[in-house]
Image: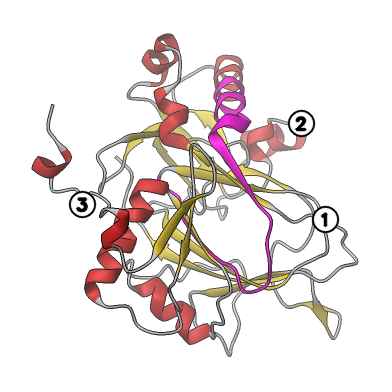
Amino acid sequence: MQSAADSGVKRPASPSSLPFSVRPLAPQIGAEIGGLDLSRPLAEATFEALEAAWHAHCVLLFRGQTLTEGEQVAFAERFGPLSKLALMKFKDRHPAVMFVSNIRENGELIGALPDGEMFFHSDQCYMERPAKATLLYAIEIPAQGGNTLFANMYRAYETLPDALKRKIAGRRAMNIAEYNIGTINSSAIERLDNPDPNTRRHAHPMVRTHPATGRKALYVNRLLSAYVEGMPRGESDALLRALFDHQEQPGFAYEHVWKPGDLVIWDNRCTVHARTDFDASERRLLRRVIVLGETPV
């Protein structure tokens, strides 16, 4: 088997040599990074070590940050070109920036995805080139709820029964930009049978290989994955439900309780994430930037 060194994948540096601290957040996913001020440019060696830690842990948390929009964008750009696809456009904002918020000004929402819980998903999986990374920065947070759960899709794939691995090998799932499409409810089925040609959709491998680590990850999700191509509807629905239930096991996950000043970056190529419910009367404001990814293979 080819080693990480032979493949060119960077191994995380030993903790004693890092210019920052790394504290695991959960057994299977996530790490808190300490000792870095992201409002200031990082030296190349520091960024390379940070990127290696990101590849190792899939989700990185930075507490106590004070970031302007421009500083968040500049940090995001270190990971690659930004995705300009936002659910809401703002005249005075960078085109890759979107607020996730329930706050209204003059009766109008200032952001997108305002209230309630959200099922597990991978950002922009309905695009030909889905999101590589998402960077979410907390500005205002409710007293309770609105937490984000992250689950490790490397582990989800690796722990699949062999029969399920064989069943999804080489298959593709259609992902559609319709929230809750993957719940296979009656209204979702009607939309599948009578698709809106303007709704963004794209089929991707159900198992994708991460371009940096070479590891395989399960790449379907309950919120946006609609059906398995080339499979009868009933069989497709049953297979997807089995995969959704498997990938959402608590043992693969970390639940993040937000604090103002938190910056979290996650890798959409090997994770899924969800949001818990919260009191809609409480203000919630986070700023999101997405890094454009590659076409999954």
Disc marking residue 10: 3
Give SS at disc 1. loop
Corner quadrant of residue 293: bottom left
Which colour assignment does the render follow? secondary structure
Label 2, residues with CA under 10 Å away: few <14, some 14-19, many ≥20? few
The mark that comes first in sequence, 3 or 2, is: 3
Check disc 2 and give the amino acid type. Answer: Ser
* Residue type, mark 3 in image: Lys
Assign the C terminus to one quadrant of the image: top left
Position of residue 1 relative to residue 175, above or below, is above
Report if residue 244 lies within the magenta region.
Answer: yes
User: Pointer 3: residues within 10 angstroms few (<14), some, or many (20+)?
Assistant: some
As drawn, the residue found furthest toward the right would be: 281
Q: Residue at x 54, y 33 (%)?
A: 252
Provide residue 117's location: percent of width, then percent of height.
75, 49
Above-or-below relation of 261 to 68: above
Residue 36 % position (x, y): 43, 74
- Residue at which label 2 appears: 186
Give the magenta-colored segment's residue range: 241-269
The image quadrant that residue 16 belongs to is bottom left
Q: Horizontally, is 285 left or right of 22 in the view?
A: right
Alpha carbon separation for disc pair 3 and 2: 47 Å
Decide: is 208 above or below 78. above
Q: Is residue 97 magenta?
A: no
Q: Which residue is depicted at the point 38% across and 55% down?
A: 54
Looking at the image, which is closer to me, 74 or 103?
74
Is residue 218 visible from the viewing direction of this image? Answer: no
SS of the residue at dot 2? helix
Q: Residue furthest bottom?
A: 92
The nearer-to-camera label among 1 and 2 is 1
According to the picture, the residue beneath numbered tag 1 turns out to be 278
Q: Amino acid at mark 1?
A: Phe
